[in-house]
Amino acid sequence: MKQRNQQKGFTIIEVVLVLAIAALIFLVVFLAVPALQRSQRDTQRRSDIGRLQTAITNYAGNHQGGLPTAAMLLDTTASGFVSKYMTSVGDKWGDPKVGTYTITNTAGGILISAAWNETTSNVNYLTNAKCNDDGTVTTGLGNRQFAIQIVLENNDLYCLGN
């Protein structure tokens, strides 16, 4: 019987193929992870705006339908609206990337910046206003209506109101 002289190991083609597959997997992961993180942060922002909407609605229910003023929401002290109505021990109300929300009161219903900003996350609070389907706001309505706007990282306007 004749014995073959076989060498053990991988051929260069097999090694290149494995490296190419690994590179493709890494590429997919590096492209998908940032988009997933942006989506999760935008979901958190939507949730935070929902919490603010609930707090404003609860405030109105406890104050004969009167809404908090913009000045009340702008008060960031320990006795301010956000501290009083939205946070409890260990709870945080802040942008998941920037760290804090800047509450604004922009007349006309358009945010100061209609594009995502890496350094400031503006939340626009308007009374006598309502949300439109495209995230913009119509103002000059009944004094028991309000709208809250925020720009998400994908530059969409998100709006909630009553």
Image: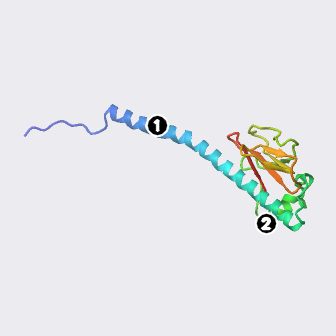
Q: Nearer the viewer, residue 76 or 146?
A: 146
The Cα–Cα distance between marks 1 and 2, rounded to whole angstroms, is 45 Å
Question: Could you tell whether 22 is left or right of 66 in the image?
Answer: left
Question: Could you tell whether 135 is left or right of 76 in the image?
Answer: left
Q: Residue furthest bottom?
A: 62
Query: Could you say which quadrant of the image residue 87 lies in?
Result: bottom right
Secondary structure state at the residue bearing disc 2: loop
Q: Nearer the viewer, residue 63 or 22?
A: 63
Tell me if mark 1 has few (under 14), some (14-19) or many (20+) residues whose alpha carbon lies within 10 angstroms of its own: few
Query: x, y percentage for residue 144?
Result: 86, 57
Query: x, y percentage for residue 157?
Result: 73, 43
Query: x, y percentage for residue 12?
Result: 34, 31
Residue 103 shows which numbered tag?
A: none
Secondary structure state at the residue bearing disc 1: helix
Q: Which residue is mark 1?
A: 24
Q: Is residue 73 above or below residue 61?
A: above
* Residue occupying the point 71% across, 44% down: 152
Q: Nearer the viewer, residue 134 or 71?
A: 134
Q: Which residue is mark 2?
A: 89
Query: Could you say which quadrant of the image residue 83 lies in?
Result: bottom right
**From the image, which quarter does the N terminus lie in?**
top left
Q: Amino acid at mark 1?
A: Leu
Q: Is residue 96 above or below residue 114?
A: below
